Image: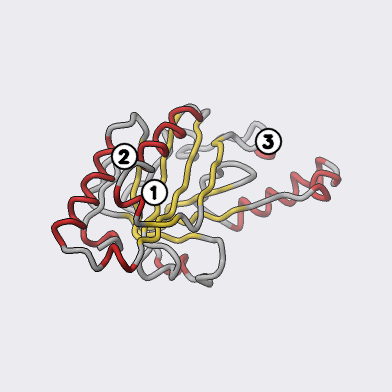
């Protein structure tokens, strides 16, 4: 599996919210149409009720960086993008962890393309940066620590040493400070491999 992820959060301005409903609806349709037509798999999540500093999370999945760059350039040309800021943006690579060794199991995160898992409603994205002191540890010690990490977070899909994500159904996984860089978002409907911005998306 050799996929790249781009996590983008959008926070719309108060001025945009004061536009008339027809214009706001047109802006959302424009953004969704651009996201839908770029050959990038996009999943939209609402941040309403989980973060105070952003409204929408877009999880974009592509096979190469150029596709993600082209996708974001097109998004940047939309009205809704111009009316919003991006509090958080992460780039991650989906790679099999070196700490798993030869381990395999049915239903593993690399057995299928990236994306929402079944009927689970939430995704948690958390940055994880390893310092130089981490790599100074012996490989055996790093493997032991990571094995404990994997066990402590069931159903976690490891994206990379930079960013990981997991889809979970329990809203209690969202319990984190709004000032934290951890992002918990609720999945939008309908559940298709493209971006949708319904009224429940938090972007109204």
Lateral position of residue 178 relative to residue 82, left or right: right
Crowd rating for badge 3 (residues with CA inside 10 Å; few <14, some 14–19, many 20+): few
Image quadrant for the C terminus? Answer: bottom left
Residue bearing the label numbered 3: 98
Residue bearing the label numbered 1: 58
For image coordinates 68% across by 34% down, the residue present is 101
Secondary structure category for the residue under label 2: helix
Residue 80 placement (x, y as % from top left): 31, 52
Give the alpha-carbon distance from disc 2 to disc 1, as whole Å: 9 Å
Residue 11 placement (x, y as % from top left): 40, 60
Residue bearing the label numbered 2: 35
Residue 145 placement (x, y as % from top left): 73, 52
Give the alpha-carbon distance from disc 2 to disc 3, as whole Å: 33 Å
Secondary structure category for the residue under label 3: helix
Of labels 3 and 1, earlier in sequence is: 1
Secondary structure category for the residue under label 1: strand
Depth order, front residue of 151/74 = 74
Q: Farthest residue in the left direction? A: 22
Label 2 with label 1: CB-CB less than 8 Å: yes
Give the alpha-carbon distance from disc 3 to disc 1, as whole Å: 28 Å
Crowd rating for badge 1 (residues with CA inside 10 Å; few <14, some 14–19, many 20+): many
């Amino acid at each position: 599996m050799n996929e790249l992820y781009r996590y983008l959060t959008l926070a719309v301005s108060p001025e945009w919210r004061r536009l008339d409903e027809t214009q706001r609806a047109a802006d959302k349709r424009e953004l969704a149409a651009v996201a839908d037509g770029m050959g990038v798999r996009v999943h939209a999540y609402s941040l309403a009720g989980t973060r105070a500093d952003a409204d929408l999370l877009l999880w974009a999945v592509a096979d190469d960086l150029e596709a993600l760059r082209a996708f974001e350039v097109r998004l940047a040309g939309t009205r809704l993008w111009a009316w919003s800021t991006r509090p958080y943006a992460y780039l991650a690579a989906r790679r099999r962890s070196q700490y798993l060794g030869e381990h395999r199991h049915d239903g593993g995160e690399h057995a299928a393309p990236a994306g929402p898992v079944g009927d689970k409603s939430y995704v948690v994205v958390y940055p994880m940066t390893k310092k130089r002191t981490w790599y100074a540890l012996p490989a055996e010690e790093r493997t032991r620590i990571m094995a404990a990490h994997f066990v402590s977070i069931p159903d976690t899909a490891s994206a990379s040493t930079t960013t990981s994500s997991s889809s979970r159904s329990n809203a209690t996984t969202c319990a984190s400070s709004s000032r934290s860089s951890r992002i918990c978002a609720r999945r939008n409907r309908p559940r298709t491999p493209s971006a949708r911005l319904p009224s429940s998306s938090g972007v109204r």
